[in-house]
Amino acid sequence: MRSSTFRIAAAGIGSVMALAACSTGAPTADSSSSGAAGGSNNKTIAFVQGVAGDEFYITMKCGIEAKAKELGYTVTTQGPQKFDPTLQKPIVDSVTASKPAALLVAPTDVEAMQAPLEQAAAAGIKVVLVDTTVNDPSFAVSQISSDNIGGGKAAFEAIKKAKPNGGKVLVISVDPGISTTDARVKGFEDAAKADGTYQYLGVQYSHNDPATAANLVSAALQKDPDIVGIFATNLFAAEGSATGVRQAGAKDVTIVGFDAGPNQIKALKDGTVQALVAQQPAVIGSDGVEQANNALTGAPVEKKIQTGFTIITKDNLDAEGGQAAYKSTC
Amino acid sequence: MTALFEARGLSRRFGRVQALDGADFDIAEGEVVALIGDNGAGKSTLVKALTGNLDLESGQILYEGREVHFATPHDASRLGIEVVHQDLALAPHLDSAQNMFLGREIMRPGILGRLGFMDTPQMRQRSAQAFTELGSAVRSVVVPVGAMSGGQKQSVAIARAVAWANKLLFLDEPTAALGVVQTRNVLDTIKRVRDRGISVVLISHSMPHVLEVSDRVQVLRLGRRVATYQTSGTTIEELVGAMTGALDNQEGAA
Amino acid sequence: MSSTTEHQKAGSGAPMETSASHENLVERVKAMQSVWILGVLVVIIAVFGVLAPTTFLTPGNITNIAQNVSIWAVLAVGMTFVIITSGIDLSIGSVLVVSSVVAAQVMERMGDQGWGTALVGLVLSVVVGIFWGCLNGFLVAKANVPPLIVTLGTLSVALGVAQILTGGLDVRSAPAVLQDNIGYGRLAGVPVITIVALVIVVLGGILLHKTRFGRYTYAIGSNETSARRVGINVDRKLVQIYGFTGLLAGIAGILSLAQYGTTTIAGQSLTNLNVIAAVVIGGTSIFGGQGSMFGSMVGLFIPAVLQSGFVIIGVSPYWQTVAVGSILITAVYVDQQRRSTASGGRR
Ligand SMILES: Nc1ncnc2c1ncn2[C@@H]1O[C@H](COP(=O)(O)OP(=O)(O)OP(=O)(O)O)[C@@H](O)[C@H]1O
Ligand SMILES: [Mg+2]
């Protein structure tokens, strides 16, 4: 009895290990051979995402892999199950132990990831921060992220294109104190105030709740029925804003959303939003590889790079707009 | 002779079943009383009611002539009253020594004991001794009770109750799962316990056993005591008649 | 008890003698799940050792793994007690967060970076942890709400309280002495946080296996009725056990502050499930009555070693979840087999 139990258990565990072995396949062979060689001919790059399975990071990974192939590197990608520093730290520690030549990482917390990443840099790994950053990034060879202020400006441009005659504009953001969304709001505000034909009504916070966003927008439309454009800094804010517009019975309001994951693209196709400001995660990734390569080969490195945006509307969805949408596979 | 332990008019209902319907009970010091009755007559319920395992709707319990109220089984234990329940109530994952001393652990002497450390070797030794004396079929005291046969479990439960009872011992069908030798041992144990001056209440469906060890027999039917007999002057036929109701109105006959 | 011994030496009937010790040590050892699961851990380590000899089995990596399981180990001590009572505590991650939030806010206000401040933080964190733990225990024992529901509730209430206290923004300050000495300090090459965890685990193991408190924990999980019948105050014990788990979550809250330097409000999202998985892999039965501290620790290392190994040899993160889940199911399956043999059934 006991022995059969053991056999089944062994089979279970064994199959797990086998799975692991198959799924590794080629990359293992590659990375371990180059890892063993060590030193300057180490051609591995590790990419640690903020969260596994998110289209933004998958698109970034595609950019990384394409550039790495061009430059002759192999890439292994890891990511925690949630955007959670307590889950990301063990992964970074193990990556450090595996001694890649470079590490591209999207830190999940400015404070919690500081020490683990410093440790990686101290182990001689070239660390490039992509998308997000830490409190004191001086150990990193380069930081690459979207220019969120520029993103806010781009959102304003999108409204301007749809409503060239000017009017009142409103921002629905998530919560105060989030650096990325705050920067987007600031960029929008600056651009709107600089243009005399538009009247900036300020920012309201939805607390990441579509219902709150809807209430805010319909109340704003009661007060100012002539609002022409709303910039919603994330998906829930955009969805709620659209509901609010419908509730208030307003027709001709342009809603501009942010990011271009499948949900956002669907919202665009459905007419919930009229334009999207897409970041360029693939560019962030490929720039990251390029900077890592520069650091490894002794070429000059750019300490800080800010990438641009693409505005997607229904009209360009089949052309450059569609290409800017985030991918779920490479 | 005043009763050591006496109950008057105990009642308890479970939904539509009147499990106890004004039941009386009494036992004297050093006496062995057999409690018999058909399945569902209320014997186990009565035992639970008498030992703080069950709340009552009405009735009175007297111990050494004074009214007592057992809110928990522990209250009864404190007076030296122990029970072997029909369902045994052992912890299957603990071994027999651990079960034997559950709730009454022997602590290590001194500061360690104060900190909650137990004297495991001593508890094992004492349990082994108790089992050996009982002649039980428990081979080792460090085997989890859950891994034992039904009869071995029963031995453990009996050994535990016998070890701790010093006034009154309730045995609810203690021989139900036992082999011939072990049954004999239990009957001998009952006599030995009585010889120590401890009263024993035996619930059993085996009339020969009842006649062998008891001094008196009390018959329970439909939740009330319907008859009491001196064992020396009764027969199996009479007892069966009282249980089934063929013979009625015997209350107080003895 | 003593009164029985002076009677009858004859011991009528069978001449069998009951032994006071193990009949066969090998049998006993084999029956412990922690032994075969330890074997599994050794095999996993060996496999990765072969696959990545220069990177996996390095002192640096092993210390990292130990450091990264330290906080979970502290939580697993409490979880082992709770699961042995046949309960569950889903709230530990949230209790950890709310404890560290209260501690961090007060320490930030004190401003000082020294040990005094850290000590105040520790006391506060532990008090908050005990509060939530006792609340869990009280609801489980007295209000008779199933532990799954109670702790699912406190999971979100405690997290909500942490968010209310902070407005959802992490407190990103911990006294420097905590971060430098506990979070990232080392003693003879061993991370201090790991030493702290080890001490707690050893004390927890002693409490579980050697003291009456531990014995009652098993008794309650094994057969609550029998525990009540022998006079164990089951309700009070349950409050104590859940309270103890909360206390450990409070300690873990301070350790987390020391390690991450922030309150990780949005983090710790899978902490409860990971700790429960570790305890169950280690042979503690979710049906109660069975388990060991050693097993929980082995159970904690299996997912951690697997993850580290998989990252080092470059396996996709998705496979890691598959592997850990499979091992969890296998472990419970084997546990069931053992259970059915232990209860005498041949199946
Ligand atoms: N906890 C309970 N809930 C509901 N009904 C109960 C409960 N305990 C006992 N009863 C009912 O009370 C009646 C008496 O049961 P009890 O167990 O006392 O009988 P008994 O005389 O011990 O029978 P047996 O010889 O089969 O052990 C039965 O009808 C039983 O179904
Ligand atoms: Mg009965």
Image (cartoon, rainbow, N blue to C red):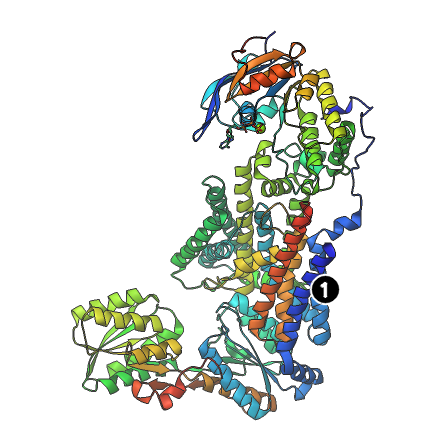
Quarter of the C terminus of chain B within the rendering: top right
Residue at 48 percent of width and 46 percent of height: C146
Q: Tell which of A23 and A194 is nearer to you.
A: A23
User: In the rendered image, which residue does mark 1 sit on?
Assistant: C42
Q: Tell which of C53 and B100 is nearer to you.
A: B100
Q: Residues within 10 Å of mark 1 (few under 14, many from 20)?
A: few
Helix, strand, or loop for circle 1?
Answer: helix
Q: How many labels does the image show?
A: 1
Quarter of the N terminus of chain B within the rendering: top right
Asked whether mark 1 and ligand 1 are closer than 8 Å, the reply comes as no
Residue C130 left/right relative to C160: right
In the rendered image of this protein, does residue C193 appear above or below residue C238? below
In the rendered image of this protein, does residue C244 appear above or below residue B220? below
Query: Which image quadrant for residue B102?
Result: top right
Q: Whole-percent x and y of residue A302?
A: 50, 88
**Chain under callout 1:** C
Residue at 76 percent of width and 28 percent of height: B134
Q: Whole-percent x and y of residue B115?
A: 65, 39
Q: Tell which of C203 and A315 is nearer to you.
A: A315
Q: Whole-percent x and y of residue B230?
A: 63, 10
Query: Which image quadrant for residue C238?
Result: top right
Residue A249 left/right relative to C264: left
Q: Which amino acid does label 1 sit on?
A: Val
Q: Whole-percent x and y of residue A299?
A: 57, 92
In this rendering, does residue C12 appear at all?
yes
In this rendering, does residue C283 appear at all?
no
Residue A179 left/right relative to B165: left
